Amino acid sequence: RLYNKSKYSQTLFLLGSQYAVLKDTIIKKANGLKKSRAESKKVRNILISFGGFDEFNFTLKVIEFLESLRRNFNVKIILGAGNSHKDEIEKFIKKPRFCDYHIYKNIPDLLKYYLWADFMISSGGLTLFESIALRVPAASIAVYKHQIKRCLFFERKKVIKYLGFRQVDKQKLREGISKSDFKHYNKRLLALNIPDIINFILFFYVYI
């Protein structure tokens, strides 16, 4: 709406929930995967990541819910560089708990953690796109309003459970962990070839 279309008339707009610019390592691994992980083994390993700040401390809300299930999950928690809740989270997990927790802070590349996880709980930001590309069954919270539409889009495709805008729908999270009602991964859901799309358009304008 704010873009000067008359000045930059040849700009290509990539609109829609499925467009994301992902790291080469993520794309390479995603293209090499052969099948969905939604119907694989039961959930044992859970990855939690709520971006750089997690200002509403959804990480703590989620691990409190996991404890209420009284199951022995292995849980890896990724905290962003700007997360200010580390002390509160560590205080919670230091007490005897059902789950086994490990905290990692400011990790630049989550690839090995995605591949480790049977299930992912995240915000609706970049981690959502990366988990979908790598076919990790996931539940997501829209932390900011612009994340709502993409979460709803992927939930309609049955590749995530959408837990709500700044809230945790406990029933949906429980269903997600049990991997109920997940659809087979569809590679077309994400446009992993954005650089190819852009190169084609540039070629068209320059040489045609």
Image (cartoon, helix red, strand yellow):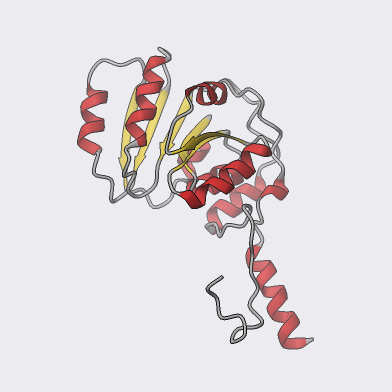
Image side of residue 203 versus residue 194, left or right: right
Count of number-bearing discs: 0
Coordinates of residue 85 in the picture (x, y in percent): 25, 39
Residue 205 left/right relative to 180: right
Q: Residue reaching furthest front?
A: 1
Quadrant in the picture for the N terminus? bottom right
Tell me the residue at 53%/46% (across/down).
148
Residue 127 visible here: yes
- Residue displayed at 43% across by 50% down: 109
Residue 117 seen in this snapshot: no
Residue 160 x/y as whole percent: 59, 35
Viewer-proximal residue, 59 or 136?
59
Give residue 182's quadrant in the image. top right
Q: Is residue 48 left or right of residue 36?
A: left
The quadrant where residue 25 appears: bottom right
Spot occupied by residue 18 in the image (x, y as percentages of width and height): 63, 53
Hey, which residue is sitting farthest right in the picture?
208
29 over 70 or under it: above or below: below
Look at 60% across and 46% down and name the residue there.
133
Q: Where's residue 88, x and y in %?
A: 22, 32
- Of the 4 image quadrants, the one containing the C terminus is bottom right
Q: Quadrant of residue 175?
A: top right
Is 55 in front, or is 36? 55
At 60% from the left edge and 22% from the top edge, which residue is drawn?
41
Where 165 sits versus 21, above or below?
above
